[in-house]
Amino acid sequence: MRIVFASTEEQEQYIEELIENMYEEVFPQYFSDETIDQLDELSVLKPQTEEMQYNGTLKEAFQIMSSLQALTALLNHLDQQSEEEHRDLYDRNINILKQYGYQFPLTFDHFLSSKEKAEEVSKYGKPANKWIV
């Protein structure tokens, strides 16, 4: 017999917030709105039910949260230094997400060589304030 602990509702919400953060803060640094729209249509970072290996346990939730946090930190501070170390970290976290049914078809090179660079203002980015003039 094995005892497992279920993830909390707050952890599930936090996973959703981390995914939202990828779309609102990370992807606009590298891709145009059209490309982000395509990623959304492809259900990038949305759990795929047919490939779902995520059972909602506490350990799995922490692994998903940690992977999303690591990817966010890595992509927010990406530079050419120690590229191999970053590539290994990126690949390891992508594999963890894929293991639990979260699709992420982008390779590390998509971010390194992203020539598309987003416009100054992206519809996916968070507004600087709530008032639009």
Image: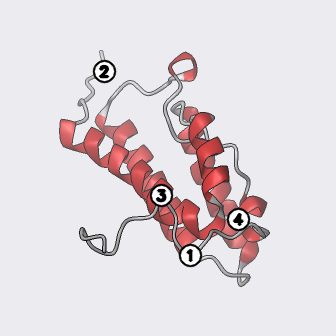
Amino acid type assigned to the residue bearing label 3 in the image: Tyr
Amino acid type assigned to the residue bearing label 1 in the image: Glu
The label nearer to you, 4 versus 2, is 4
Q: What element carries label 2?
A: loop
Q: What element carries label 4?
A: helix
Classify residue 80 as left or right of residue 30.
Answer: right
Label ID, residue 120: 1
For the residues labelled 2 and 3, the Cα–Cα distance comes to 43 Å
Q: Residue 17: image x %, image y %?
A: 33, 50
Residues tagged 4 and 1 counted as in contact (Cβ below 8 A): no
For label 2, the residue is: 2
Amino acid type assigned to the residue bearing label 2 in the image: Arg
Sequence-wise, the earlier of marks 4 and 3 is: 4
Sequence-wise, the earlier of marks 2 and 1 is: 2
Q: Residues within 10 Å of mark 2 (few under 14, many from 20)?
A: few
Sequence-wise, the earlier of marks 2 and 3 is: 2
For the residues labelled 4 and 2, the Cα–Cα distance comes to 41 Å
Q: Quadrant of residue 86?
A: bottom right
For label 4, the residue is: 111
The label nearer to you, 4 versus 3, is 3
Label ID, residue 124: 3
Depth order, front residue of 123/56: 123
Q: How many labels does the image show?
A: 4
Residues tagged 2 and 1 counted as in contact (Cβ below 8 A): no
Q: In which quarter of the image is residue 118?
A: bottom right
Q: What element carries label 3?
A: loop
Identify the residue shown where x is 51% and y is 71%: 121
The label nearer to you, 2 versus 3, is 3
